[in-house]
Image (spheres, rainbow, N blue to C red):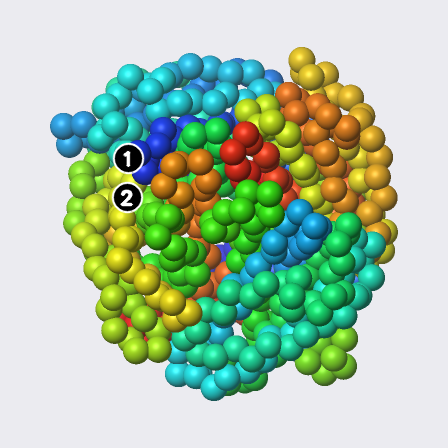
Amino acid sequence: MAKIDYKKTLREFSRSPLGLFLREKLNIYPPAISLRYSEVSSDLFIWRDPNDWDTYFNLTHLGPILNPNYQDSYEALIEFYDAHGKLLGDAKVPLIYGVNALTDIINLSSGKCTSGNSGTFAVFHLADKHAFFGDAKICIAERGFVSYKKRVDQSMLRSYAHGNANAIAYSMDNHKSRCLGVLQKSMHYFRCQLTLQDAVSSEIALVNFLDTDAEVGVYQYKNNTKEKLTHITIHAGGLALLKSGLDFDATCLLEFESRINFLRPVIFKHYQNHFDVLHG
Amino acid sequence: MDFYFFLDSKNFPPAITISGYAPTGAGSSYEKQVFICYAYPKNGLWAVRTHTHIGNATSITLLWSDLGLSREEISSTLIFLSLTELSGDYDTLPYITDFTSMPSWRANLKIIGDGTSVSYQGEFPYGMTKIKGGSIISLVPFIQNHPTINNYLLYASFEQEPVHKKGSIEFRNIRSKQTVAKFDIETNRINCLDLTGIDPGSDQLLTIATGAMGIPIFFSVDEQGRKMSLEHTMTPSEYSIYGEQDVKRSIMQRMKAYWN
């Protein structure tokens, strides 16, 4: 008689839809996010101050990579948020099979993303999920790509970054969006595996994808000693922007402590002639 | 374990910043020193060497020239971490059980320009080196058509066997299904492909790589090398979430059958 591998069975169950549901409800090894099958998910991409930056997104019909036989047009819903996570407005854009629609996010917001501010936006694919996946229990996720230009550069070149996390979901049933992050039982830590000291200056953007405010401790390691730099509160669905020189020392290793699973920052490194944008 | 590679774009020096600490978890990852090792194909074997060591809470930036290898060898070199010094010639790539984390233990893979740099946090997972041949399909939103911008695909492909096997990568127009360009590629190197002449306009392109499993990374740079962009594509499976593995697999098989 074949032996039952209890460890493997338990692991597989913990990752099943029922297992994920129970982990969240019972708060035992809660999953990073909580998504329902009636929802579509998106990252919370960052739009930057239109005074200084242009922000773009490549809107793409996902048929070619999820089901190439599904070639009907469908709409994408773009929701715009401010840095406090408040919904500013939305826009719908038709997605046509085989078209790569480079979209100016600030123009698309029709004045909602205003100068002097920054925030986030989400891209939801309002596709007929059944046409994509049949009866399979699976959700569509938008993972990128956002790109930026600095106005002062007067350059034709955009700098790209992909999506980071399944941060927010839109329900096809009740037509509402909600943040997906699950408040973790214990503190989680994220350390950037890179150095910032080669740049003239750097900015670190942190997005809270919990549906409650998040307390974030920012630490630095200098000569193997950990010291607390600051403590910030990021509103639900909100954005915090930290600047080198003001908020952290670019020569140090940085660590973020919070009850968000996977608080991975977006980093802007500013050099003499241009900039780099990447996930930390 | 994960490997790291130099983004060899021929005209600009690549660098790697590698860290002795994990991205997540409380406290230090390792109390001991961490060795920076590398492997490159030489005479039908992987030549494995140790470059240096670092402290557990530090990072080091390696310029391509630091290893004393030729540019050709550098484009085939994998960097990795080890808790012991390694030196020797191997039939297959070393497997180190340490330095695993969720998310992956990444390094900063960088290209240095004139008064600027561009990078991403990347890795080449050990599991991917076990796939012989293989194919990968991705959407390509990155080509920036302008007379002053040059676009390149840096296709990173590594396999266990220490030889260079042939493969190809094709750019396909999704609407017309026509092939707009096709390049020869090889395993165990960064294939730097000049995309001059590929002008998709607003059409969506797809890349289909066959015979060499890898990571498509797109690099755009202005004529002076002063402004740059770098990003890798997502695999199609990353555009969906949840679903049983067999369901996801069947979606991928249907998609590959359509495009191949």
Q: Can residue A135 be seen here?
A: no
Give the image quarter of residue B188.
top left
The percent position of residue B259, horizontal first and vertical second, equals 30, 72
Letter of the chain that mark 2 sits on in the rendering: B
Q: Can residue B151 be seen here?
A: yes
Letter of the chain that mark 1 sits on in the rendering: B
The percent position of residue A54, horizontal first and vertical second, equals 61, 54
Q: Which residue is mark 1?
A: B10
User: In the image, are marks 2 and 1 on the same chain?
Assistant: yes
The local crowd at label 2, few if under 14, some if 14 to 19, many if 20 or more residues have their Cα within 10 Å, is many
Give the image quarter of residue B20.
top right
Q: Residue at x 73, y 25 (%)?
A: A245
Residue B192 image label? 2
* In this view, A165 is above or below A190: below
Q: Nearer the viewer, residue B102 or A58?
A: A58
- Label pair 2/1, CB-CB below 8 angstroms: yes
Q: Is residue B199 left or right of residue B237?
A: left
Q: Nearer the viewer, residue B138 or A139?
A: B138
Q: Amino acid at mark 1?
A: Lys
* In this view, B195 is above or below A131: above
What separation in Å lies between label 2 and label 1 (alpha carbons)? 7 Å
Q: First in sequence, mark 2 or 1: give its number.
A: 1
- Of the 4 image quadrants, the one containing the N terminus of chain B is top left
The percent position of residue A247, horizontal first and vertical second, equals 77, 30
Q: Residue at x 36, y 29 (%)?
A: B13
- Of the 4 image quadrants, the one containing the C terminus of chain B is bottom left
Q: Nearer the viewer, residue B222 or A128?
A: B222
Badge 2 marks a residue whose secondary structure is strand
Badge 1 marks a residue whose secondary structure is loop
Which residue, as the protein is rendered here, is positioned at the far left? Answer: B43
